[in-house]
Amino acid sequence: MTFDSYSPLETEQLGELIGSLLTPASTVALYGDLGGGKTCFTRGLVRGVAPQSAHLVASPTYSIMNEYAGTPPVYHFDFYRTSGSSEIVELGFDDYFNGDGICVIEWPERIEDALPTNCIKIHFDYLDDHQRKITIETAGDPKTVEILELLATRWQHQKKL
């Protein structure tokens, strides 16, 4: 499923919509280069889950994980500086992937083999300063397929308003 975003606001709105559809133990993996819109999308996702924490969203590049209070909590990971899945397991971060919160992962390609099978994968392609192509896919898990179907319907409805 592919979406075109023509502004940071649209990217945040898409994130907010998907965030409103997620449930505990959901994992969202964000792929894309620097400046692709991953953190902007995450700000929207957090707004959809825990609006009181959305203003706190920043890339956790140096801390590896930021936690945003909500029901459920959102765990925002940035694995850019990690050396692979074994490091994630050593640090215990893999325990979060099937826990009580929602996990959002930037730079998931560094830990691909540790991602849960029900992970929603989102690819951000930088087209120009104002446009991104955002492609969302799942491995076919029924719950994530349902989330994507609802997302497509609600996004189309929102765009018409």
Image: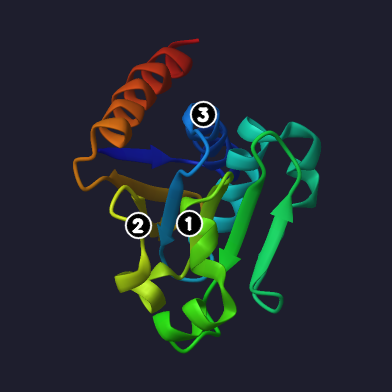
Q: Residue at 51% across / 29% down in the picture?
A: 17
* N-term-proximal mark, 2 vs 1: 1
Quarter holding residue 110: bottom left
Q: Secondary structure at mark 3?
A: helix
CA separation, marks 3 and 2? 22 Å
Q: Secondary structure at mark 2?
A: loop
Q: Residue under label 1, please give it.
A: 97
Q: Residue at 21% across / 48% down in the picture?
A: 139
Q: Nearer the viewer, residue 130 or 14?
A: 14
**x%, y% of residue 40?**
60, 51
Q: Amino acid at mark 2?
A: Pro
> What mark, if any, has residue 116 been given in the picture?
2
Q: Nearer the viewer, mark 1 or mark 3?
A: 1
Q: Residues within 10 Å of mark 1 (few under 14, many from 20)?
A: many
Q: Is residue 129 visible?
A: no
Q: Secondary structure at mark 1?
A: helix
Q: Residue at 70% across / 61% down in the picture?
A: 66
CA separation, marks 1 and 3? 21 Å
Q: Amino acid at mark 1?
A: Phe
* N-term-proximal mark, 3 vs 2: 3
Q: Residue under label 3, please give it.
A: 17
Quarter holding residue 160: top left
> What mark, if any, has residue 155 been given in the picture?
none
Q: Residues within 10 Å of mark 3 (few under 14, many from 20)?
A: many
Q: Nearer the viewer, residue 105 or 102?
A: 102
Q: Nearer the viewer, mark 3 or mark 2?
A: 2
Cβ atoms at labels 2 and 1 below 8 Å apart = yes
Q: Nearer the viewer, residue 18 or 75?
A: 75
The residue lying furthest to the bottom in this view is 83
